[in-house]
Amino acid sequence: VQLQASGGGLVQPGGSLRLSCAASGFTFKYYAIGWFRQAPGKEREGVSYISKSGDSTDFVDSVKGRFTISRDNAENTAYLQMSNLKPEDTAEYYCAASPFDYGLADAKVFEYWGQGTLVTVSS
């Protein structure tokens, strides 16, 4: 089982990045996907979620209107499109997979976790 997050980097405030989460070793379409982030010295927080079918999404308030989430079940990949990035978005971003369509309420339902990809928003 593997979740491979990629696409992070250094971007100026107001810029955009698209993170990818490539899955292998399990049946991707049967798992909801969440994106989480952890900034230095802060607790991990759930950022965005997409249900197994892609019909339902959710976002933490601080990114609503700026981030979108999508998935391609044929390609076993989920995406987090981040726009109008702010310095406070700087963090390590992780994707995770849950067999339940429970949203971001409980990180413990996410069974598989990928390694992080670092996003740095700075001028």
Image: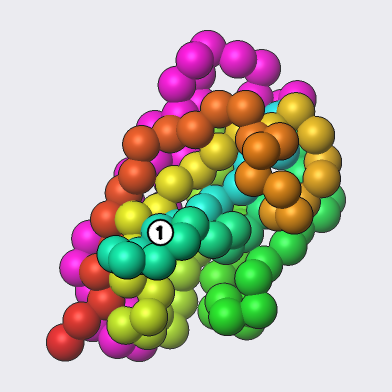
The residue that appears at 66% across and 38% down in the rendered structure is: 108
Instruction: In the displayed orientation, state which residue is furthest to the left.
Output: 123
Measured as percent of width and height from the top left, residue 101 is found at 82, 41
Circle 1 — which element?
strand
Residue pictured at 82% horizontal, 45% vertical: 102
The image quarter containing residue 74 is top right
- Residue 50 in sight from this viewpoint: no
Q: Above or below — where is 112 with respect to 39?
A: above
Q: Position of 67 compared to 42: left or right?
A: right
51 w.r.t. 11: above or below: above
Look at mark 1 in the image and give the residue it sits on. 38
Q: What residue span does the magenta drawing correspond to?
A: 1-30
Name the amino acid, label 1: Gln
Q: How is the image coloured?
A: rainbow
Q: What crowding class fits label 1: few (fewer than 14 Cα within 10 Å), some (14-19), or many (20 or more)?
A: some
Q: Is residue 107 above or below residue 120?
A: above
x, y (%) of residue 84? 43, 84
Residue 19 vertical placement versus 95 (above, below): below
What residue is shown at x 40% (from left), y 59% (from top)? 38
